[in-house]
Amino acid sequence: MPLIDLSAPIRPDPTEYPEPLRTEIEYEDHARGAATIEAVFGVNRELLRDGEGWTTETFLRFGTHNSTHVDAPWHYNSTIGGRPAQTIDQLPLEWFYAPGVVIDATDRNDGEALSAADVRERLPRELRELDIVLVRTGRDEFYDQSDYIARGPGVSAEATRWLYEQGVRVMGIDAWSWDVPLHVQAELAKAEAKPGIFWAAHQVDLAYSQIERLFNLASLPDEDFRIVCFPLRIEGASAAPARVVAIVPD
């Protein structure tokens, strides 16, 4: 069965990226690895093959939301439905290996939010409990551009609630955020001066997970595939990176 990688690459970001959003990685080459071995174990490079030691990489800065990742309910609010929200390590593994469907939203402009009716009309089949719903916007094309954060349509709180009512617990999008871009919601929230507008789909008070910053959804059929998206088991975390893969039957 073909495997399709739906994850963005993890690599250092340009220094002009805002610090909270930036990934920084230190690479230790074979020469530095040999020096480490000599310093720690007293084994000099003449005793190593080709005089080389191990290579390692160290994350100097890597937020749990800085790559293709799975959000936990704890990310949205401290309580969901009047109970303590679950962190990423508390979510059932069954959520993250399930049949997937794709909703095509490539015709929508940046800043537009899909309604529940939009989602229903675009579904390739009737949803089943624990289906994973992926929204294809095509904005992964702009992943390396500085305005990636400001691009993409999003999904409304109403549509998120409707998906949840169908038994969906994992929803994903190939844009920076499941909601419409934050600057759009910020202006609306300030103009209306009331809660429930900014970050509306995130703070819909439902225990569900989002996959954000997906890649390569255009390579998927609309249905008849499975998604594997197990997040790293980071204790008490609001999210975790995941290697998201689609399994497509021949």
Image (tube, grey):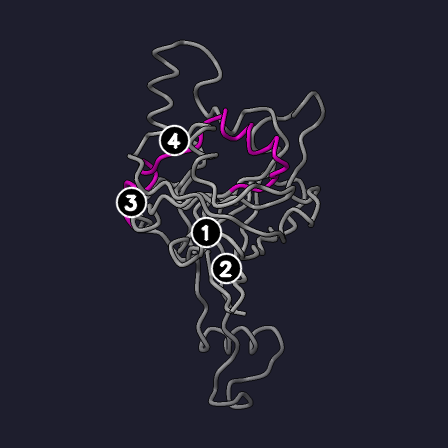
Mark 3 lies on residue: 16
SS for dot 1: loop
Q: Nearer the viewer, mark 2 or mark 1?
A: 1
Q: Earlier in the sequence, mark 2 or mark 3?
A: 3
Q: Nearer the viewer, mark 4 or mark 2?
A: 4
Secondary element type, mark 2: strand
Q: Quickly name the residue at label 4.
A: 180
Amino acid type assigned to the residue bearing label 2 in the image: Thr
Say whether marks 2 and 1 touch (CB < 8 Å): no
Does residue 167 belong to the magenta stretch? yes
> In the rendered structure, does residue 93 fall within the stretch colored magenta?
no
For the residues labelled 1 and 4, the Cα–Cα distance comes to: 23 Å
Q: Earlier in the sequence, mark 2 or mark 1?
A: 2
Q: Decide: is 6 above or below 32.
A: above
Q: Nearer the viewer, mark 1 or mark 3?
A: 1
Q: Determine the residue positioned at 43% across, 27% down.
A: 115
- The part of the chain drawn in magenta is 144-171
Residue type (three-letter) at the residue carrying disc 4: Val
Residue 222 is labelled as 1
Q: Residue at x 72, y 24 (%)?
A: 83
Residue under label 2, please give it: 58
> Label 2: how many residues lie within 10 Å, few (<14), some (14-19) or many (20+)?
few
